[in-house]
Amino acid sequence: MRKLLLGSLLFLMPYVLIAQSQESAYDGRGSLKAGAEFSSYNPDFYCSSSSPFSCGASGLSLMKGIGVFADYNIQSRWGAEGEARWLRWGGDAGQLEATYLAGPRYRFYRWRALGFWAKFLIGDGAITTANYPGPSTLEGNFLVYAPGASVDYRLTRRFSLRGDYEFQIWPNFAVAPSLGVSGELVSHNHGISPNGLSIGVSYTITGH
């Protein structure tokens, strides 16, 4: 219920902004976009590399999943974004991750049909670690904040392609120590930093 409520609030946010700024929503200065994307993430937990393209020598695979997002651009440069992402495939021994985030975004460069954006999101992260409910595992929710960047390529007046990179920080994540591959004790009380890439399509509902 908590995740459903948070997700609902995230995606109601752009509509609240519209209600507060109806004039800007229709005079070309504001726009509302919604879309879906496919994501590939390094979950950090148990991975020996922080690369978004590989888990490193650990032999684990990247986690894959789908997401939805909504962007309300208050004017040509500033906007707000809400997103929900569910990483449900490729996780080691049943590991799952989901995030529900929102925050400001800023377009720092535009070239023809390309727009380059920076963002800073904050919200809730849910995780079920590998081999749960075994030793040194957990299922829980944590604070997440995530700087990131995205590029939009306008295909038509309404449709755009989007590529996105996000670096998530889960500062409060911690589980009991576990044994590593060589029998060493591995600590997991320092938070985790999943990061990854997404590609998707958005549709402009209002504005330009």
Image (spheres, rainbow, N blue to C red):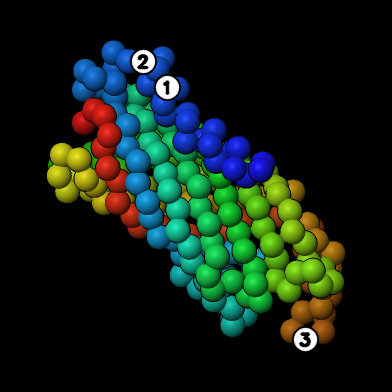
| Residue under the image location 60 percent in, 59 percent down | 97
Give the alpha-carbon distance from disc 1 to disc 3, as whole Å: 53 Å
| Residue under the image location 21 percent in, 22 percent down | 28
Place of residue 202 in the rendered image (x, y in percent of width and height, measured from the top left): 30, 46
The amino acid at mark 2 is Ser
The amino acid at mark 1 is Leu
Place of residue 76 in the rendered image (x, y in percent of width and height, measured from the top left): 28, 27
Give the alpha-carbon distance from disc 2 to disc 3, as whole Å: 59 Å
| Residue under the image location 78 percent in, 57 percent down | 174
| Residue that extends furthest to the bottom in the rendered view of this protein | 182
Q: Which mark is residue 182?
A: 3
Q: Are marks 1 and 3 in contact (CB under 8 Å)?
A: no
The residue labelled by disc 1 is 17
Q: Which mark is residue 33?
A: none
User: Which quarter of the rendering shows the N terminus?
Assistant: top right
The residue labelled by disc 2 is 21
Q: Of residues 26 and 114, which is closer to you in this image?
A: 26
Question: Looking at the rendering, which quadrant does residue 144 occupy?
Answer: top right
| Residue under the image location 70 percent in, 49 percent down | 141
Report helix, strand or loop for mark 2.
loop
Report helix, strand or loop for mark 1.
helix
Mark closer to the chain start, 1 or 3 = 1
Q: Is disc 2 surrounded by few (<14), some (14 to 19) or many (20+) residues within 10 Å?
A: few
Question: Of discs 1 and 3, which sits in the foreground?
Answer: 1
Q: Is residue 148 above or below residue 41?
A: above
Q: Are marks 1 and 2 in contact (CB under 8 Å)?
A: yes
Mark closer to the chain start, 2 or 3 = 2
